[in-house]
Image: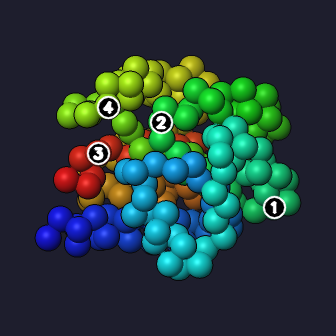
Amino acid sequence: MKSKELRSVDSLIVDCIERANVDIICSVPCNMLAGILSEIDRRHLVHIPVCREEEGVGIAAGAALAGKNPLVLMQNSGLGNAINALASLTKLYGLPLFLLMSHRGGSGEQIVAQVPMGKAAPKLLRALSIDFITVEDVKDITLVEHAMKTAYRENKISGALLSRELWR
């Protein structure tokens, strides 16, 4: 039953990605996002795995300059790695970008090293004036699509933190 629920959540999120007309997806590996990444590949969406988050932001910036709608998938812990690229490239030049992040480090987190960035990520996003939503319930997944479309329409960076609760 649990794996069926996982596929359902992952499929719903990828449905949002498709409906928001995302053209290119860059991703850094994350076990919470593994099902989403599998679904992206199953649907043959344009997907570029990257080694580091700022690499994904750089590729996404190039795609945005070419008129594409880019998405970067990563853990919230990778936000720290991407701050300079987000602030001095994407944000400075008003390039659209959506950050879809697993929100690690909250209640029930088994890996203690995830906790500091789990707490800091929302504060960092606010400090950078990046609009974001936190998605904790399946019924709120469609908010991701709306947030993506807004980011692309308004040429800005936005994001979503996907809570572990989504997959429970």
Cα gap from disc 3 to disc 2, whole angstroms: 12 Å
Q: Nearer the viewer, mark 2 or mark 4?
A: 4
Check disc 3 and report the residue beneath it.
164
Sequence-wise, the earlier of marks 1 and 4 is: 1
Give the percent coordinates (x, y) of residue 45. 61, 74
Mark closer to the observer (1, 3)? 3
What's the amino acid at mark 1? Answer: Gly
Q: Nearer the viewer, mark 2 or mark 1?
A: 2
Q: Is residue 21 left or right of residue 6?
A: right
The reply to whether the C-beta atoms of the residues labelled 3 and 2 are less than 8 Å apart is no
- The structure residue drawn at horizontal position 62% and vertical position 30%, both measured from the top left corner, is 81
State which mark lies toward you, 1 or 4: 4
How was this image coloured?
A: rainbow
Q: Is 111 in front, or is 105?
A: 111
Residue 117, x across and y down, in percent: 44, 25
Q: Which amino acid type corresponds to the residue marked 2 in the rendered image?
A: Asn
Check residue 76 in the rendering and tell me which mark sits there, or answer none.
Answer: 2
Q: Count neighbours of disc 2 (C-alpha within 10 A) and say few if under 14, some if 14 to 19, many if 20 or more.
A: many
Q: Which mark is residue 67?
A: 1
For the residue labelled by badge 3, is the local secondary structure a helix, a strand or a loop?
helix
Q: CA distance from mark 2 to mark 4?
A: 14 Å
| Residue 43 x, y percent position in the rendering | 53, 79
Tell me the quadrant of the picture where the N terminus can be found: bottom left
Compared with 119, 2 (above or below) is: below
Q: Which residue is mark 4?
A: 111
